[in-house]
């Protein structure tokens, strides 16, 4: 099955979930749960919490799959957004002095891109990484770490050893440049 | 731009969407973005665009198989809750306020009649009628603590299909109303998500109502419903199911 076919199969399964087909939910789970568990683990750090959130994610997929629109969103992006948002919400609800240990998170990031990861390894991927390469290294890593680790401006600033205002302006400039570059 | 300058992102729509997607906001700012995302279509579009732009970062996340208990938990949750089956949503009929109000009025009338029937001793089912028959065709008005009727619930003669009609909206709260059934002396069980803009049809097939009259309650929950299987938000309306 090539990448387009995989993407299409996942989109089809999501549409069937939207129609109340629980076997299709199992299919979506089997195709995507390892990726989404990786996403949750990286943000939350603690496996038991990541398991809780992952369970919530698929229950939420079951309830909201009707809102998935294959013409507007890629299925894995849609699913990953649910997982990231749930995990980030969970982290933000923690006491403010706790945050995901960055070292553990980085250790988790070293896998080779899997078949599913390559679902999105397309034009968009080359574009993002090409444009990211035009940013200063410290800015690149701030953007990447924000997205993958779900860190706040405050934590990013502390980890990079720069004032909060500096981190905000790094991120702001980086996002503006990325958007402009990716629209070229 | 000064590195120590103030956050200038306040008015910048696209930047706000990007900040939300990136996940850099603190809890308060994030809650504001989540709120905006519920009601602001242009913001939804901008957020989706940023999700797509940044999605290739996900390539860097290693796949990690989740323990089997995660799927078991998902399966348990979705099988214990009733599947929400909204009325045909594309039907223009339901979009017409007059028809919708008419349906509400009709159901209110039915509910009022049912309530009336219940208090007439002559219409009470005789002891010879099986309890199964006695528990069908029932209705509940779900009222706010101040007594405003917010929803009317009716159950059809099969005892399996529950129709919930919104009568009036309690508040502008953007959270999702979720219906719970509270068996006498038992813990609330999720029935399904409600809409404030149209009736929904819910199945009671997987819920045992028991013989005592259960209470229905509506709580406000995050989008997609309570993540815990128990009400997490305020209960805005409740009412006792009355059999005819």
Image (cartoon, rainbow, N blue to C red):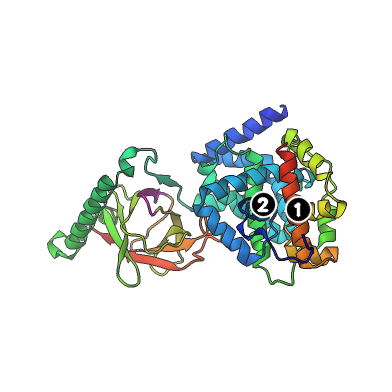
Q: x, y (%) of residue B197?
A: 37, 51
Please, is residue B198 above or below residue B171 in the view? above
Tags 1 and 2 both on a single chain: no
Dividing the picture into quarters, in which one does residue B143 lie? bottom left
Q: Which residue is denoted by mark 2 in the rendering?
A: B18
Quote the CA–CA distance across marks 1 and 2: 12 Å
Q: x, y (%) of residue B240?
A: 32, 65
Dividing the picture into quarters, in which one does residue A181 lie? top right
Q: Which residues fall within the magenta stretch? A: B196-205
Label ID, residue A17: none
> Chain ID for label 1?
A
Q: x, y (%) of residue B165?
A: 32, 53
> Chain ID for label 2?
B
* Residue B224 visible here: no
Please, is residue B29 above or below residue A31 in the view? below
Residue at x 39% of width, y 49% of height: B202
Quarter of the picture containing the C terminus of chain A is: top right
Asked if labels 2 and 1 touch by Cβ distance under 8 angstroms, the answer is no
Quarter of the picture containing the N terminus of chain A is: top right
Q: Relative to residue B235, is residue B135 drawn left or right?
A: left
Q: Which residue is denoted by mark 1 in the rendering?
A: A173
Q: x, y (%) of residue B48?
A: 61, 45
Q: Residues within 10 Å of mark 1 (few under 14, many from 20)?
A: some
* Residue B244 visible here: yes
Q: Relative to residue A171, is residue B194 drawn left or right?
A: left
Residue at x 51% of width, y 51% of height: B40
């Amino acid at each position: 099955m090539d990448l387009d076919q995989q993407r299409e199969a996942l989109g089809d399964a999501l549409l069937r979930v939207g129609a109340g087909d629980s076997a299709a939910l199992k299919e979506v789970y089997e195709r995507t749960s390892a990726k989404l568990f990786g996403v949750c683990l990286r943000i939350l750090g603690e496996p038991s919490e990541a398991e809780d959130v992952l369970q919530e994610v698929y229950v939420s997929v079951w309830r909201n799959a009707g809102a998935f629109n294959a013409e507007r969103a890629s299925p894995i992006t849609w699913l990953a957004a649910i997982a990231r948002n749930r995990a980030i919400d969970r982290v933000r609800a923690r006491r403010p002095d706790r945050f995901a240990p960055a070292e553990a998170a980085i250790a988790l990031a070293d896998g080779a891109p899997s078949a599913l990861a390559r679902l999105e390894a397309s034009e968009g991927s080359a574009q993002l990484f090409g444009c990211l390469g035009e940013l200063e290294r410290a800015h690149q890593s701030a953007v990447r770490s924000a997205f993958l680790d779900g860190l706040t401006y405050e934590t990013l600033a502390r980890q990079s050893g720069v004032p909060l205002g500096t981190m905000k302006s790094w991120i702001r400039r980086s996002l503006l440049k990325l958007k402009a570059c990716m629209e070229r | 731009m000064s590195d120590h300058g103030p956050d200038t992102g306040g008015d910048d729509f696209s930047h706000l969407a990007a900040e939300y997607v990136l996940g850099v906001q603190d809890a308060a700012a994030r809650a504001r973005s989540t709120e905006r995302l519920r009601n602001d279509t242009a913001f939804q579009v901008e957020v989706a665009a940023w999700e797509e732009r940044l999605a290739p970062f996900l390539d860097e996340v290693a796949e990690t198989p989740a323990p089997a208990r995660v799927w078991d938990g998902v399966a348990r949750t979705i099988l214990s809750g009733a599947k929400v089956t909204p009325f045909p949503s594309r039907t223009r009929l339901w979009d017409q306020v007059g028809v919708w109000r008419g349906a509400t009025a009709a159901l209110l009338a039915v509910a009022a009649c049912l309530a009336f029937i219940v208090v007439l001793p002559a219409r009470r089912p005789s002891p010879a009628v099986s309890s199964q028959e006695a528990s069908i065709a029932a209705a509940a008005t779900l009222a706010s603590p101040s007594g405003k009727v917010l929803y009317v619930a009716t159950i059809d003669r099969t005892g399996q299909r529950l129709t919930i009609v919104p009568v009036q909206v309690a508040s502008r709260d953007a959270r999702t109303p979720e219906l719970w059934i509270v068996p006498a002396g038992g813990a609330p069980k999720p029935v399904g998500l409600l809409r404030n803009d149209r009736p929904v049809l819910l199945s009671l097939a997987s819920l045992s109502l028991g013989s005592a009259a259960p209470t229905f309650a509506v709580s406000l929950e995050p989008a997609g419903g309570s993540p815990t299987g128990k009400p997490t938000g305020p209960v805005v309306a409740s009412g006792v199911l009355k059999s005819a």
